[in-house]
Image: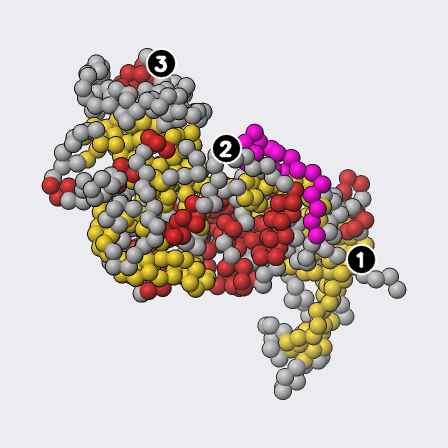
């Protein structure tokens, strides 16, 4: 049976419904639905204004709705159903909402909650083949009707299953798989409601929050805000699973909100009770062995069944479906109810207000440093960013990563009135952040897997380019951008380090001020005194699942680390800075050795105008068995170098400067032998701890990073 779904939320939070499209159109015409409302295809998160031409045309073609008829059915809460003629709508399913829509608690037990988005349905019979997967799913005997406890869990990136359970308070709680909801996207809970054999509608709940999650066990618990849990069938949890017991696994295989695959039950038995490893899906590796209570089951768990329940014959939950257990050669698995109970115990009632304590902020910063920042570069990708970074920042982080990856491929981009490569421009941009420049993202342990992934995708793209089926190419294209996911965790590390202005050494933290920045107590701004820093550091904290998490982005998706005040005195940068490179084999000419030293002389004038004199001295030596003199000067040594002058400004502790005049060749052999260093088109300089970091580029690649020490006075 094919169904069309329409969801409506009135401007004031109407308690009436559900409505089919005709009734929505009538209410729009009569002013009961705001003309500022927006429409959305069900399951999507992009909303279009209701005055979009395609929607105007749809509503203009609607016939007058039929008057209400008694006896056509009622909502679970008792509200009457209003019939209206169905209309063929372009682009299938639509949803309607008004902005903004305030959430309110249920008004009366017999009414639908005001925050509830309710849908009417027009039904259409289909062939018997489509009915095979649609079952009357019930528990045995007097047990719960499992189909009434099942929900779809949808985000912008996918759909899976979930089920209602008893929570810590009167509100509705859903258990599901963590991988469905761990990307920080908005979570939509949908529940099919069957009025008669041929009449259905869907209740959709967009106002949700994750109250507890366990990435190792791949479990999450979601609260539907301000909706009473007694409205729904809730599945009881078994005391513990029993080996060889008969089971039923539930879910929506192949489910999507467009195709509307139905709820399916598969029977089987518990093969064995095991311990699953904690697994990192992004990098396809085991993090810890024997970490999670699990079940090996005989039922075939398909995509779309993740997060659904596996129940015993009494209708009690014994496990939560996962796709395949990688530790046991891809057998079907479910996370044990034992792990679910442990997670449920961590869920706090909605009424329990979290007032952030300064000690909790210090504990978070110390944990970030101890378990995250101090790790060697090669081990940093083993720590999930969700352990420290606010989940609400993750969509912003992924968009940020996508922008960086696209910019890296640009051969030319405008920056400070210069034409630089995308990599050069990005490097100077990131040089404005506190700390070291993309230390993790630019490391070989990150770039290696990225390059391997990109090569594999290029081969796949080449293969698809030879196909005549363009629709197949279009369906496969989103899979070609998966390499960006490998960059999220390294960049999260680099941005976290910049946010706390970490310079590579252990720190002490003290909170001097803690401000709550919203009425709900979800966002705080802490003024932090960090040992070694010359000023207080502003750090933003988000409260999620009752725990503090580090925020990287503000509401406009700008990095807090860029704007965070750094009161670096001009005298700290002024003076002479030096660095030396020891004598080593030349990377280009293996028959020669090179040593070099560099000197920066920095002066800062009025309005933070900065002048920099940069001297590079290079000395080459003949090496190897041939011991032949150099061709340019016919000697066994070369003395050459470069003198560069730059002017720029200092902003928030960082100097960005451009050449004041063309570079000059220096050294005894400058006339005969050119320096191997190409003149720099742009540089940036800043203090990291007691060292001055210089970032320089000729405009074609990521800047080279050099560390200078303050010259000592003789």
Is label 3 in a helix, a strand or a loop?
loop
Residue at mark 2 = 351
In front of the other: label 2 or label 1?
Answer: 2
Name which of mark 1 and mark 3 comes first in the sequence: 3
Residue in view at x 76 percent, y 68 percent? 667
Mark 2: few, some, or many residues within 10 Å (few <14, many ≥20)?
Answer: few
Residue at mark 3 = 31
Residue in view at x 37 percent, y 21 percent? 108
Mark 2–mark 1 distance (CA, rounded to whole Å): 60 Å
In front of the other: label 3 or label 2?
Answer: 2
Depth check, front residue: 507 or 58: 507
Q: Position of residue 398 (x, y in %)?
A: 47, 46
Q: Viewed as shown, does residue 709 lie left or right of 192?
A: right
Principal secondary structure, stretch drawn in magenta: strand
Q: Position of residue 539 (x, y in %)?
A: 63, 43
Mark 3–mark 2 distance (CA, rounded to whole Å): 36 Å
Is label 2 in a helix, a strand or a loop?
loop
């Amino acid at each position: 049976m094919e169904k069309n779904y329409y969801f409506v939320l009135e401007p004031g939070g109407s308690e009436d419904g559900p409505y089919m499209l005709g009734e929505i159109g009538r209410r729009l015409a009569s002013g009961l639905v705001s003309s500022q409302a927006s429409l959305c295809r069900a399951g999507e998160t992009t909303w279009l204004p209701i005055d979009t031409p395609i929607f105007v045309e749809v509503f203009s073609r609607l016939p007058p709705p039929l008057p209400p008829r008694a006896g056509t059915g009622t909502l679970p809460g008792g509200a009457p159903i209003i019939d209206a003629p169905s209309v063929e709508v372009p682009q299938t399913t639509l949803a309607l909402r008004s902005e903004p829509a305030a959430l309110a608690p249920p008004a009366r037990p017999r009414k639908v909650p005001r925050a509830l988005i309710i849908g009417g349905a027009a039904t259409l019979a289909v062939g018997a083949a489509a009915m095979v997967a649609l079952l009357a799913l019930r528990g045995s005997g007097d047990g719960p009707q499992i189909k009434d406890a099942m929900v779809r869990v949808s985000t912008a990136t996918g759909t899976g299953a979930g089920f209602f359970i008893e929570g810590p308070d009167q509100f509705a709680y859903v258990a599901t798989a963590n991988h469905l909801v761990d990307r920080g996207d908005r979570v939509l809970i949908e529940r099919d409601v069957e009025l008669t054999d041929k009449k259905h509608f869907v209740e959709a709940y967009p106002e949700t929050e994750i109250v507890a999650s366990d990435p190792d066990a791949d479990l999450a618990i979601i609260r539907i805000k301000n909706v009473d849990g007694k409205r729904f069938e809730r599945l009881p949890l078994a005391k513990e699973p029993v080996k060889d017991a008969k089971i039923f696994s539930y879910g929506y295989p192949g489910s999507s909100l467009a195709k509307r695959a139905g709820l399916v039950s598969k029977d089987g038995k518990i093969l064995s009770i095991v311990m699953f490893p904690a697994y990192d899906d992004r990098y396809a590796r085991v993090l810890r062995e024997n970490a999670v209570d699990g079940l090996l089951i005989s039922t075939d768990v398909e995509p779309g069944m993740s997060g659904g329940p596996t129940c015993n014959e009494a209708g009690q939950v014994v496990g939560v479906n996962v796709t395949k257990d990688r530790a046991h050669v891809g057998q079907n698995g479910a996370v044990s109810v034992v792990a679910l109970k442990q997670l449920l115990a961590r869920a706090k009632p909605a009424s329990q207000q979290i007032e952030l304590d300064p000690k909790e902020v210090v504990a978070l910063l110390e944990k970030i440093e101890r378990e995250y920042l101090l790790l060697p570069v090669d081990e940093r990708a083993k720590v999930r960013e969700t352990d420290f970074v606010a989940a609400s920042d993750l969509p912003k982080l992924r968009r940020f990563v996508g922008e960086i990856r696209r910019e890296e491929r640009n051969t030319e981009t405008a920056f400070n009135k210069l034409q630089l490569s995308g990599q050069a421009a990005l490097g100077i941009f990131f040089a404005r952040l506190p700390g070291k420049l993309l230390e993790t993202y630019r490391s070989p342990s990150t770039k290696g897997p990225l390059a391997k992934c990109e090569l594999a995708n290029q081969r796949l793209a080449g293969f698809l380019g030879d196909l005549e089926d363009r629709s197949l190419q279009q369906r496969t294209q989103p899979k070609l951008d998966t390499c960006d996911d490998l960059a999220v965790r390294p960049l999260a590390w680099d941005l976290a380090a910049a946010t706390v202005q970490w310079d590579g050494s252990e720190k002490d933290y003290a909170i001097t001020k803690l401000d709550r920045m919203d009425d709900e107590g979800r966002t705080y701004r802490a003024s932090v005194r960090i040992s070694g820093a010359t000023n207080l550091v502003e750090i933003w904290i988000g409260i999620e699942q009752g725990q503090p998490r580090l925020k990287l982005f503000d509401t406009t998706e700008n990095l807090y680390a860029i704007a965070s005040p750094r009161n670096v005195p001009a005298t700290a940068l002024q003076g002479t800075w030096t660095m030396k490179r020891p004598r080593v084999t030349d990377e280009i000419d293996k028959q020669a050795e090179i040593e070099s030293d560099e000197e920066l002389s920095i002066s800062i004038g009025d309005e933070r105008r900065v002048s920099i004199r940069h001297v590079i001295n290079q000395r080459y030596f003949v090496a190897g068995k041939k011991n032949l003199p150099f061709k340019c000067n016919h000697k066994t040594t070369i003395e050459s170098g470069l003198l560069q002058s730059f002017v720029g400004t200092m902003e928030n502790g960082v100097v960005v400067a451009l050449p004041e005049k063309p570079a000059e060749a220096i050294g005894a052999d400058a006339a005969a032998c050119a320096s191997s260093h190409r003149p720099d088109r742009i540089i940036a300089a800043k203090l990291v701890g007691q060292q001055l970091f210089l970032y320089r580029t000729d405009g074609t690649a990521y800047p080279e990073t050099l560390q200078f020490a303050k010259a000592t006075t003789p």
